Amino acid sequence: MIELKNIFYSYEDKEILKDISFHVKKREKIVLFGVNGSGKSTLLKIINGLLFPKKGKYFYKGNEINKKKLKDKEFNRKFRKEVVFLFQNPDSMIFNPTVYDEIAFGLRQIGGNKDTIDEKVKYWADKLGIYKYINEPPFNLSGGEKQKLCLASLLVLEPEVLLLDEPTANLDPKSTGWLIDFLYELDLTTVITTHNLSLSLELGDRGLVLSENHKIIYDGNLDDFINNFDLLKKAGLVHTHKHRHGNLEHKHYHTHDF
């Protein structure tokens, strides 16, 4: 479904991604790890067609995704409907005057029957527990409610691929638990970035790990990665130090978002 071949990306002469290659099958659930600055968000933006690799190729359903391809309005409309991206900060996605308009925006952009749009907007507002706010300004919502609103505005398009950048970073424990349960029920291909090792096994089955030098250092079973201390250390997701009063070595895992 998704294939990246030898992808390189740089920004102002600084390399962000180096020789990235992997496949994603339909309905696969992938967790993408890496410390801050390793290139996780950039990689999601390339998959979403917001950025284009400096070298290498990205294919979606056999179509190479590049500037020229996305200038085809019909293909662009189809691609934008099928591959959607939830940013880490919901405020960066919200710009409509009401919750209803926010959810309806994407459907209106791709065209559709007014009654069908109305039905879908109300369905997803109810599904995500924000129906009571449907006529209110979205800026009045709490952080968790804004996250639900952004999800509704994406899922109303009935996408096939959902990309999520640190979706639990700004959520309290209750909202985090709700989101994990909700994502588990979705029959979609998902690629989710996180620092949260303790939650990762509930978000996917396959782990992709970017190192501090912007290369993939692991691609495989998520459980095996979580239980491999050497790989975790190599990825910068765990560290050790010696106790100052002796030679005992302590391990510290990054089990929360930061």
Image (cartoon, grey):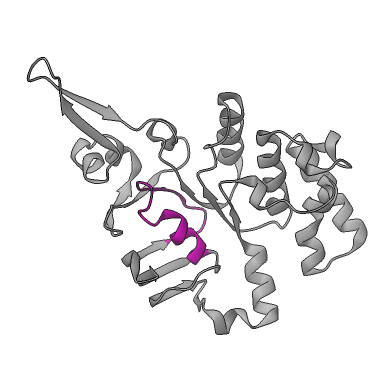
Q: Is residue 20 visible?
A: no
Q: Give the left or right position of residue 190, taking residue 106 as reference.
A: left
For the point 77% across and 68% down, the residue is 110
Is 222 in the magenta? no
Q: Residue furthest left?
A: 247
Q: Residue furthest right?
A: 115
State whether residue 136 is above or below residue 39: above
Q: Where is residue 46 shown, x and y percent of the image?
A: 48, 66
Is 39 in the magenta? yes
Q: Is residue 214 visible?
A: yes
Identify which residue, 187 or 97, lies in the foreground.
97
State whether residue 7 is above or below residue 137: below
Q: Give the left or right position of residue 230, taking residue 164 as reference.
A: left
For the point 35% across and 54% down, the residue is 38
Q: Magenta stretch: give its range.
A: 24-47
Identify which residue, 24 or 21, lies in the foreground.
21
For the point 55% across and 67% down, the residue is 50
State whether residue 250 is above or below residue 11: above
Q: Residue furthest top?
A: 245
Q: Give the left or right position of residue 183, taking residue 134 as reference.
A: left
Q: Where is residue 99 shown, x and y percent of the image?
A: 81, 45
Q: Where is residue 22 shown, x and y percent of the image?
A: 36, 63
Question: Quadrant location of the C terminus?
Answer: top left
Q: Where is residue 218 shown, x and y percent of the image?
A: 27, 52
Q: Give the left or right position of residue 241, taking residue 85 as reference.
A: left
